[in-house]
Image (spheres, helix red, strand yellow):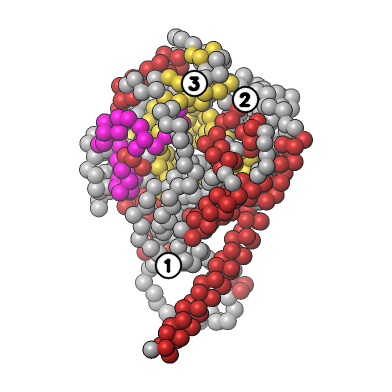
Amino acid sequence: MEERVEQCQTSGGRDGGQPSAKRQCRDGQTRLAPPRELRQGILQHLLEPVVLRGYLGGGAGTGDGKGDGGAGWGCLEWSIDKWGEIFGNQELDFRVGQRVGTGQSLSAPQWESECQKAVMTFCDFLEWARGATSCTTTSGTEVKSATHWAYFDYYYLKDLGGQCQLEGAMDWGALGFPERGVGAGTLWIGSAGANTPCHIDTYGCNLIVQVLGRKRWVLFPECQSGLLSATRVPYEESSIYSSAGFPRPSLQCHPKLASATPYVITLHPGDTLFVPRHWWHSVENLDLAVSLNTWLEVPEDSAERVKEALVMYSVASLCQGVTSLDLLKSVFNPNMLDLATMTSPDLLALLREKVLAMTSPLTPTDTPVTSSLTPVTPKVTPMHTTNTHTVTPSFTPTLVTPTSKINLPSTLVTSTPPHPPSLTPSHPPDPQKSAKSRWHCADWLAKHSIEKVPHMTFCQYQRDILALGQVRSGQGVPGSATSQLESDLRVLIDAFTDRRVVSVLKEVLEEKMAERREMEGCGREAEEKGTGKNE
């Protein structure tokens, strides 16, 4: 596949001067990496977040992922009112939170359970976000966009009306994943200020396309987990949260953050962000914004699903006998509350179902396996029109080429002395190694309009990005008071679900499962021998 040579510039903005997704290209020095090379880099070589600039645009998609990368994303040309036409009069559930003022910080996130809910049509939401109207939440509170934000977040397009209108308007093949259809995408629409608490997704890696408006992403590598006050409360399958008050965390309440190095990027329309596996991220809308994403499975997901099953059982078991609904609401995210009502036999059956659904052995091998990349579904959020929620998703683990290889330290490789220069065997260049090195070459990335997300000190992030100077501890949106019982339960849950503890439990579980398989095999062999003698 030949690479297209082009120079892209973002055209001037509609909607009050914001950048448009439409890009004007001319011959120049910038080359867009072809989709198949993007796919290889995402699945095998990239270990840090990157942004792809100018890879998407309007036009009809080829559907085969072999185009130049700009086709198939006609939705980037849509106005925000066009999205209103797609949803029509469908009632949508919005999460409503309080805005944080300039110079204010948060001692804790605005958890989903602490946010209000509002039911609006999309057109009503647009009028509200533009400040023309107020809306009444389900709790009877009247709120305005000047003091609150609203977020229609984490909804699979396959579950929404108007999906047929999106066919041909978005094509993941332009990024190297033509097998991912419209139904595999998730939609996020929110007013300025709408945000997601800082968290890790335990499954998969993430591709995000910014469609309208601007959205700021703040990311941290997994190795900095100890600085982010990780917690499993509120519990949600596949999500590990930071208890720090992102997107405006208080350094006084969480002093370990001072040693963290956030990776910060603002996405504009047409930008694509790749978030590798197990990177912490917090997201905030800077304008009324629309974005789409899709999760890609990785080989490690098979083992992670077993760990998540153990976490689920631990959290639900610790909450057995808790009769306070308020306490349960503080422990479980709203979409996981059904788990709190399950009996011990039901929990055991659910754990057994999840564990036995995994492939054998539980730990994936290092053998590359071609995958169809079935959608990752780490979270399910019920629509306003649906009052039921199943907490037992059907998992079909599939493996893709491993993202990394194990490299032994040179001090351990001592059994074979190095070849003398004259005897060193000649080997042809390794194409995989060559491809990997390209993704770590600054010149190659710049040439192909691929930017590594820059990082900075945490104090610089607070000062320059958030414009937070000297602020008082915990200033800003207040959180709910924590009782002694709730505090004790949080400590127990975090202790029982600590990733170190869960890893040991998984190893023991694998050992016991192997023993059971061995015993079952011996039993069948003995039975066959006995049957042979009787005959």
Residue 226 shown in magenta: no
Residues packed near mark 1 inside 10 Å, few (<14), some (14 to 19) or many (20 plus): few
Q: Dot 2 lies on which element?
A: loop
The residue that label 3 is drawn on is 118
Q: Is residue 156 left or right of residue 512?
A: left
Q: Amino acid at mark 2?
A: Ala
- Identify the residue shown where x is 45% and y is 63%: 359
Quadrant of the drawing holding the C terminus: bottom left
Q: Is residue 173 left or right of residue 398?
A: left
**Nearest to N terminus: mark 2 or mark 3:** 3
Q: Is residue 127 left or right of residue 487?
A: left
Residues packed near mark 3 inside 10 Å, few (<14), some (14 to 19) or many (20 plus): many
| Residues at circles 1 and 3 in contact by the CB criterion of under 8 Å | no
Q: Amino acid at mark 3?
A: Ala
* Of the two numbered discs 2 and 3 in the rendering, the one whose residue sits closer to the viewer: 3
The image position of residue 50, as x and y in percent, is 46, 44
* Of the two numbered discs 1 and 3 in the rendering, the one whose residue sits closer to the viewer: 3
Q: Dot 3 lies on which element?
A: strand
**Nearest to N terminus: mark 1 or mark 3:** 3
- Identify the residue shown where x is 40% and y is 64%: 368
The CA distance from mark 2 to mark 3 is 30 Å
Q: Dot 1 lies on which element?
A: loop
The CA distance from mark 2 to mark 1 is 49 Å
Label ID, residue 276: none
Residues packed near mark 2 inside 10 Å, few (<14), some (14 to 19) or many (20 plus): some
The residue that label 1 is drawn on is 367
The residue that label 2 is drawn on is 467
| Residues at circles 2 and 1 in contact by the CB criterion of under 8 Å | no
Q: Is residue 21 above or below residue 528?
A: above
**In the image, which residues are magenta?**
152-181
